[in-house]
Image (spheres, rainbow, N blue to C red):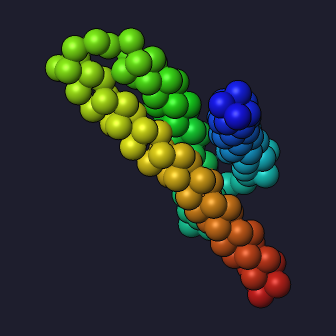
Amino acid sequence: MNEILKELKQKYAQAEEKYSYFLLAVAASAVAFAVQKTEAAKLTWTLFPMALAVIAWGASFYFGCRHLVFAQNTMISNYELLTRKDKATIKSAQEDLYSDIKNANCSKELQFLTLILGAIFFLIWHIIGIVLRTFP
């Protein structure tokens, strides 16, 4: 039974890592798409939502990288916790582990939220363009 739990935990960790990489790829692709869509654009107020979208997608990429770093730190902190012998160093390792877990979870949530925020700003930019083409 213990081996099954270990395998399940490992698969969950791999799936979470793949999901983070997927969101990183989406954010990077969204920035590239925004650059392509605005390649011939002139600087006007209508580009403001697009600029906010690119900033949000950049933030999503940053938080995704940060999440992966903290997830790796969590594994290292967990190893440190398991190898420590005296109470003082165990307590220190536990604090490091909890801090890394908290930071990884926070970064993961911010990665997703800023990705969605970028999509919302992009849609606003797109709708403004449609309205301006409809009612010049």
Q: Nearer the viewer, residue 33 or 119?
A: 119
| 42 vs 33: above or below | below
Direction from residue 80 to residue 66 in the image, left or right: right
Q: Residue furthest bottom?
A: 135
Within the image, what quadrant is residue 31 found in?
top right
Residue beneath the point at 17% across and 20% down:
88
Residue beneath the point at 28% across and 12% down:
85
Quadrant that contains the N terminus: top right
In the rendered image, residue 67, in percent from the top left (x then y), is placed at 52, 36
Residue beneath the point at 62% across and 65% down:
121
Within the image, what quadrant is residue 22 found in?
top right
Q: How many numbered discs sit on the rendered protein?
A: 0
In the rendered image, residue 16, in percent from the top left (x then y), is placed at 67, 40
Q: Nearer the viewer, residue 91 or 108?
A: 91
In the rendered image, residue 73, in percent from the top left (x then y), is placed at 45, 24
| 127 vs 61: above or below | below
In the rendered image, residue 9, in percent from the top left (x then y), is placed at 65, 35
Within the image, what quadrant is residue 94 found in?
top left
Inspect this view and state whether residue 24 appears: no
